[in-house]
Image (spheres, helix red, strand yellow):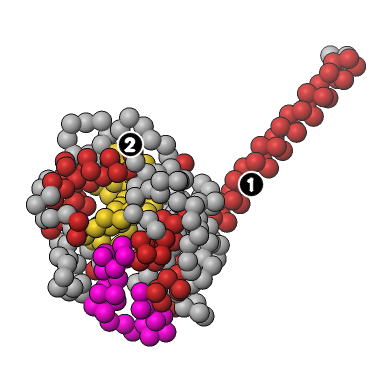
Amino acid sequence: MEPLNGEEETKKPIILYIIIIVLLIVIVVLSILLALKSNADPENVIFNPIRKEHFIQVKQPFYLNFTKEDGGAYSYNGLGNHLDSEYFKILDIYNMQPTETRAILSHFKTYQQTSEFSSPCSLIIMILTYYNLEPPGERDCSLDFGLTPEEYQGTYNRTDIFNKCTPQKIAEHIFSNYGLEVETTANYTYDHEIYQDVENFGIWVKNNIKEGNIIIVLHNDWAGQYTAIIGIDDIGTNNTADDVLIMADSYDTTDHLQDGYIIWSLEKFYYLWRDTVVPFYKDDDEINHGQFILIKKPKNN
């Protein structure tokens, strides 16, 4: 039986609507796939597939004529990213907010260093940016510490570098150049409660993060690396076995997402940090483990 003309006319707009909806779905899916491909492309300086506004752009690399061969995490340019990693979960740490169990410095922007040994200045850039202060260039900052970039291009003496950038010297630089209040290991004796057990250390970290302070720590990653603690979560349990530290790392190349953030087990970090000697760091005036720089939030910030 032939359909009536009225029924034919009714079906036409329905079919048109279905075609339009299908086309819109195809466009959205293609847009998402193109965006993911762009973010995964090593030639694009976009390490985070979620958003890119949390990156501090490199304005002045360590070397005047910077190339990928000069090293540094920046040269990786997302090389190890796996957006569908089976081993690491993608977290939007930039937009994380404090909770009952978590203290965090929300909207902390990250930076990837352009040499193998400029983590101190890379962290200074991040910290000043977070406190809305004008950061130096990575090269100028390094020169202030007596690190002449061309002197270290290709070959360098790690002991010399570490002793030019001890925690005490970094703290003095931050205080004298930017007026920020700082404390270091030198302000604490080794029998202080933060060195006695991981529980006290976790409480100390959490209280400081809640106050808006940032904690730079020197530990044994890469035979000696500075990173910044910007968050901690005790997961709401009465033990530290599941506690985590949220850190800003200027050499973030090992967790399948080069977004400048890393997650550490609190316990694992604590005992490596407190008990492990950092090679090449041989300043007789300071112990070379359990080192930190506490940067206090500016009063007018």
Q: Which of marks 2 and 1 is in front?
A: 2
Residue 31 percent across, percent down from the top left: 64, 46
Give residue 199's quadrant in the image.
top left
Nearer-the-camera pick, 35 or 23? 35
Q: Give the range drawn in magenta.
A: 145-172
Residue 79 percent across, percent down from the top left: 45, 63
Write down the residue under mark 2: 102
Sequence-wise first label, 2 or 1:
1
- In this rendering, the count of numbered labels is 2
Give residue 258's quadrant in the image.
bottom left
Q: Split into 4 quadrants, where in the image is the N terminus? A: top right
Write down the residue under mark 1: 31
Q: Does the magenta stretch include residue 163?
A: yes
Circle 2 sits in a helix, a strand or a loop, which is it? strand
Tell me if 243 is positioned left or right of 27 in this view: left
- What whole-number distance in Å separates the C-alpha atoms at marks 2 and 1? 35 Å
Res 126 seen here: no
Amino acid carrying label 2: it is: Arg
Q: Which residue is drawn at 25% across and 74% down?
A: 163
Circle 1 sits in a helix, a strand or a loop, which is it? helix
Q: What is the chief secondary structure element of the magenta stretch?
A: helix
Q: In this view, does 139 lie above or below 45?
A: below
Residue 144 percent across, percent down from the top left: 39, 74
Q: How crowded is mark 2: few (under 14 residues within 10 Å), some or many (20 or more)?
A: many
Q: Is residue 48 above or below residue 116?
A: above
Nearer-the-camera pick, 85 or 113? 113
Q: Is residue 164 magenta?
A: yes
Amino acid carrying label 1: it is: Ser
Q: Residue at x 37, y 56 (%)?
A: 180
Q: Which residue is drawn at 33% across and 39% down?
A: 210
Q: Residue at x 26, y 64 (%)?
A: 167
